[in-house]
Image (cartoon, rainbow, N blue to C red):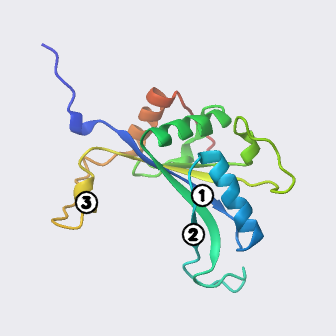
Amino acid sequence: MTEKENPMRRIYLEKVVVNIGAGEGGERLQKAEKVLSMVTGKKPVITRAKVTNRDLGVRKGMSIGVKVTLRGDDAVEFLKKALSIRDNKLADYSFDQYGNFAFGIADYTDFEGMKYDPNIGIFGMDVCAVLTRPGRRVEKRKRAKVKVSKKHRVTREEAIKFLKEKFNVEIVSLR
């Protein structure tokens, strides 16, 4: 008799956040917003500065970037496209201790079907992915919050194994 796998232990992609930091508002931010909507097919949200930094000329509350959060099938499809741009290779330092990972894409024209537009220029982006297990909601909900045990959290090694199996990603050690 074979032992069944516990369905609460399976790992899945919760969300993918795609971010472009324009660094300033105005025309550059509008171009970044246009690039992000072309690449993801979704409407971006404007991100605002949380603190004032005089050296960079940034005030608290100033519009400095755009982001899109993808979930479900949209997230999986976008992640496949983004990883193919990176030749399905990720550095081992891209993973944190909770199994989340992030990487950058240097230019939006690397995506299939995107052509360089001189009116827009060159924009790179950050792609951050969150891996989780069923039952994580108990930590996030408003009523009757409970901590998720360490055994139920996704570890760095489990995330690497998940990416190798599901997305055929090669992990490169650069240390």
Disc number for residue 139: 3
Instruction: Specify whether 153 is left or right of 172.
Output: left
Circle 1: residue type: Asn
Q: Are marks 2 and 1 in contact (CB under 8 Å)?
A: yes
Distance (Cα) linking label 3 and label 1: 25 Å
Tell me which numbered mark, 2 or 3, is placed earlier along the sequence. 2
Of mark 3 and mark 1, the one earlier in the sequence is 1
Read off the residue under disc 1: 19
Measure the C-alpha gap from mark 2 to mark 1: 9 Å
Check disc 2 and report its element: helix, strand or loop. Answer: strand
Q: In which quarter of the image is residue 146?
A: bottom left
List x then y, in percent, for residue 9.
25, 38
**Dot 2 corresponds to which residue?**
47
Q: How far apart are marks 2 and 3 (CA)?
A: 25 Å
Check disc 1 and report its element: helix, strand or loop: strand
Total labels drawn: 3
Local packing at callout 1 (Cα closer than 10 Å; few below 14, some 14-19, many 20+) is many
| Observer-nearest of 115 and 150 | 115
Where in the figure is residue 92, as x and y percent of width and height?
55, 42
Dot 2 amino acid type: Thr
